[in-house]
């Protein structure tokens, strides 16, 4: 029936067999995500709508992650509003400080999302869950209030572009390098209001951690959603959650795509995005030697155990450069415990890094590592807009964990093989 994954998921959730690109539909939701920074406005709108209860307390997740632990009174009030709303509405999937983490890691790791789901969240990087073969996208706080009350939202069915990634990634490279490379090729608006379907032999070989990173950053090319067809790796990830059953949704063989791209990444250089856009991606050699004041390793893109192992390997047992600060941010309590149990927490601490509690913190320039005037940072986060991470004159370069580890040791942007 020439339908893509995106079309099929939207059709099923709107009670239809098919939907057409550009069509406006109403579709029922499987999960609605909110965070401490987006929920308070939604609560206000929810009240003004005259709503008294949410459509399904089990299909709402509220996560403390952006300004926590509370950096000031205003941040504390944000969390308080969300906490009280969760209690009032009986929201079971409420994640408090100390039992929380970054939302885009928490939801899949807690078994709250699955293949074929339709998920919205008041955070632009909600497209992360497309790594599981779901259609997930970001919305505003006003739309989230409507979603809480109604359990459905309107969508304009997006066209889909297919991005085929083949070959075998070289050593040190991962999902972040693919993401930055693809965004660099497409441009910051190259997939505006489109779904990106990632396929190919390298996507099939890519671990789930790398898939989450790749789909997370689809928004940086303007995409409505990033989706990877569910396969054996997806099934293995989901198998940890005995309560989940699902029916994989795959594109038809004759599915119609608005555009198709094919890239071979066998010789892909490690990528670095220069200020001030993720699309400013270049091979690391083009920026090697640039002095860095701070390295941030973590976030919803690279805050999992595989990322920390890769960064530690790249550091090769050497200390953090005396002129550079290194902040390591585990993405969840579970990841932090794993770092403690396997010794990585000690490794980074002894090297001179500081380990933060799970938080978005410096990724949004909130706290836990703000850049001062004219400082430069090398971050494994997903955005490097002007002033996002600190002073408007500061500069942030985006890269994967291997470059982050090497850069922390060298004090300048460096390839791990040069350490």
Image (cartoon, rainbow, N blue to C red):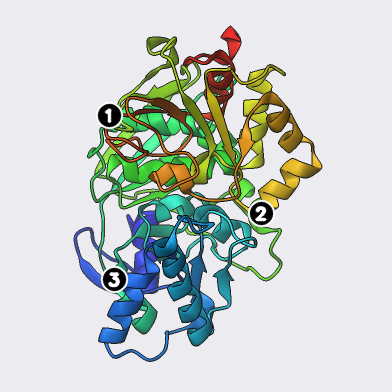
Residue 346, numbered circle: none
Residue at disc 1, secondary structure: loop
Q: Do the residues labelled 2 and 3 touch (CB within 8 Å)?
A: no
Earlier-in-chain disc, 2 versus 3: 3
Location of mark 1 (residue)? 393
Q: In this view, does 231 lie to the left or right of 267?
A: right
Earlier-in-chain disc, 2 versus 1: 2
Counting from the top left corner in percent of width and height, residue 311 is at 62, 27
Q: Name the quadrant of the N terminus.
A: bottom left
Residue 333, numbered circle: 2
Counting from the top left corner in percent of width and height, residue 236 is at 68, 51
How far is disc 1 from disc 3 in space, using C-alphas? 34 Å
Counting from the top left corner in percent of width and height, residue 380 is at 48, 34
Residue name at image x 25 percent, y 36 percent: 188
Q: Kindly give the residue lying farthest to the front in the view shown.
A: 73
- Residue density around tag 1, few if under 14, some if 14–19, many if 20 or more, within 10 Å: few
Residue name at image x 30 percent, y 73 percent: 153
Earlier-in-chain disc, 1 versus 3: 3
Counting from the top left corner in percent of width and height, residue 262 is at 37, 29
Q: Do the residues labelled 1 and 3 touch (CB within 8 Å)?
A: no
Q: Is residue 111 left or right of residue 38?
A: right
Residue name at image x 38 percent, y 79 percent: 148
Location of mark 3 (residue)? 143
Residue name at image x 79 percent, y 36 percent: 343
Whether residue 215 is visible: no
Q: Do the residues labelled 2 and 1 touch (CB within 8 Å)?
A: no
- Residue density around tag 2, few if under 14, some if 14–19, many if 20 or more, within 10 Å: some
Q: Say above or below: 394 vs 191.
A: above
Query: Exactly how many numbered labels are in the figure?
Result: 3
Observer-nearest of 33 and 259: 33
């Amino acid at each position: 029936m020439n339908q893509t994954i995106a079309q099929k998921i939207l059709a099923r959730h709107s009670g239809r067999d098919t939907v057409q690109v550009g069509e406006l539909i109403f579709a029922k939701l499987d999960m609605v995500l909110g965070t401490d920074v987006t929920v308070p406005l939604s609560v206000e709108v929810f009240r003004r709508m005259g709503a008294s209860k949410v459509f399904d307390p089990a299909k709402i997740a509220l996560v403390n992650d952006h300004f926590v632990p509370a950096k000031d009174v205003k941040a504390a009030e944000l969390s308080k509003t969300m906490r009280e709303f969760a209690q009032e509405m009986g929201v079971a999937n409420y994640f408090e400080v100390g039992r929380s983490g970054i939302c885009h890691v928490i939801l899949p790791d807690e078994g709250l999302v699955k293949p074929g789901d339709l998920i919205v969240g008041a955070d632009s990087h909600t497209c992360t869950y497309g790594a599981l073969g779901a259609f997930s996208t970001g919305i505003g706080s006003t739309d989230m209030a409507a979603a809480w009350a109604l359990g459905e939202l309107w969508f304009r069915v997006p066209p889909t572009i297919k991005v085929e990634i083949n070959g075998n990634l070289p050593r040190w490279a991962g999902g972040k390098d693919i993401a930055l490379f693809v965004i660099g090729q497409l441009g910051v608006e190259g997939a505006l209001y489109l779904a990106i379907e990632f396929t190919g032999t390298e996507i099939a070989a890519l671990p789930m951690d790398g898939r989450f990173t790749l789909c997370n950053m689809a928004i940086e090319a303007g995409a409505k959603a990033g989706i990877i067809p569910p396969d054996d790796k997806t099934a293995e990830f989901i198998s940890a959650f005995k309560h989940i059953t699902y029916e994989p949704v795959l594109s038809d063989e004759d599915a119609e795509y608005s555009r198709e791209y094919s890239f071979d990444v066998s010789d892909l250089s490690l990528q670095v995005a220069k200020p001030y856009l993720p699309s400013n991606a270049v091979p690391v050699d083009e920026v090697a030697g640039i002095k860095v004041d701070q390295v941030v390793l973590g976030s919803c893109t690279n805050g999992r155990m595989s990322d920390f192992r890769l960064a530690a390997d790249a550091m090769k047992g050497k200390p953090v450069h005396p002129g550079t600060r290194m902040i390591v941010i585990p993405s969840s309590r579970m990841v932090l415990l794993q770092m403690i149990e396997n010794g990585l927490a000690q490794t980074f601490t002894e090297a001179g890094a500081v380990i933060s509690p799970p938080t978005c913190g410096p990724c949004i320039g909130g706290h836990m590592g703000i850049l001062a005037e004219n400082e430069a940072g090398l971050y494994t986060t997903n955005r490097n807009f002007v002033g996002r991470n600190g002073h408007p004159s500061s500069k942030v370069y985006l890269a994967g964990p291997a470059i982050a580890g090497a850069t922390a040791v060298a004090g300048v942007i460096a390839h791990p093989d040069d350490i």
